[in-house]
Image (spheres, grey):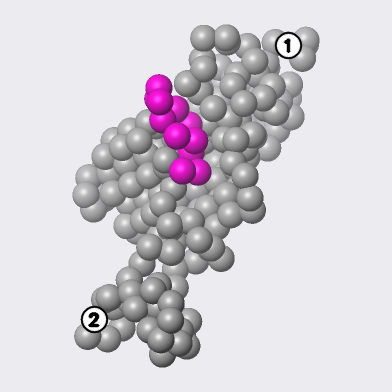
Amino acid sequence: MSIDAVPDPDRLHPSTREDLTDVVFLRNEVTGDLIDAGDYTYYTREPGQRPFQEHNVAYLYGPQRLRIGSFTTIGPGARFLMPGGNHPMAGPSTYPFTMFGGAWADRTLDAFLGLEQPGDTVVGHDVWIGRDSTVLPGVTIGSGAVIGARAVVAKDVGPYEVVVGNPARPVRTRFTPDEVERLLALAWWEWPVERITEHAATIMTGTVADLEAAAAG
């Protein structure tokens, strides 16, 4: 197989289609160490839109990170809200006194640091995140999940679960629990790209048993 026959994961845009300039392989665009993305994960950047880290992610102050697996697709306008934008809700007021520095920070920093904070926001492999959806701080989305357009994801989403609405709620799972377990064990997104390319049609439209046969072949 020619290396030119499949997209180059180290390019910003797919090397196999010159017209797909709105498709951005995320790993090659983000900077810093607060966002991780796997191979072939892409988002759609509309004309005039700022880069992903500025347009699609808010309050990325750390230490929490946004971690996204491989072969995940992120629709236009999808947003990730990170814990840096959370306001305290432990006492009578939600006002962020600490943010303003000076005497307010001096008198509240210890209390603020003592508050329980969400952890990393984690998106698995082969997830489809629909247009204009919003993922709230600290959420984990399992591999193979589908997030409907304009959904607001406030809770964890299981592998191969389909969620829609505000707040997002599960409407179905794409496979039976046994099949989900088998798919996660197969982890096709970790295969060499040559094997993925050979069995791409099976990955797209085959059964779990078909994929197991491909893995064994």
Q: Which mark is residue 34?
A: none
Q: Which mark is residue 93?
A: 2
For this view, does 53 lie left or right of residue 186? left
Of residues 65 and 52, the one nearer the viewer is: 52
Disc 2 secondary structure class: loop
With respect to residue 87, does 125 lie above or below?
Answer: above
Q: Is residue 18 visible?
A: yes
Residue at x 56% of width, y 17% of height: 201
Residue 58 position within the rendered picture, expressed as x and y whole percent measured from the top left: 41, 52
Is there a contact, CB below 8 Å, between mark 2 and mark 1? no
Residue 204 position within the rendered picture, expressed as x and y whole percent measured from the top left: 51, 22
Which amino acid type corresponds to the residue marked 2 in the rendered image?
A: Ser
Asked if the stretch drawn in magenta spans residue 195, the answer is no
Residue 16 position within the rendered picture, expressed as x and y whole percent measured from the top left: 63, 11
Discs 2/1, front = 2
Asked if the stretch drawn in magenta spans residue 53, the answer is yes
Of residues 55 and 23, the one nearer the viewer is: 55
Disc 1 secondary structure class: helix
Give the residues in magenta.
43-54
With respect to residue 11, does 186 lie above or below?
Answer: below
Mark 2: few/some/many CA within 10 Å (<14, 14-19, 20+): few
With respect to residue 59, does 10 lie above or below?
Answer: above
Q: What residue does disc 1 label?
A: 4
The span from disc 2 to disc 1 (Cα, nearest Å) is 58 Å
Residue at x 53% of width, y 63% of height: 62
Residue at x 41% of width, y 86% of height: 103
Q: Where is residue 136, by image quadrant?
A: bottom left
Which amino acid type corresponds to the residue marked 1 in the rendered image?
A: Asp
- Point out the tag, 2 or 1, that comes first from the N-terminus: 1
Q: Is residue 187 visible?
A: no
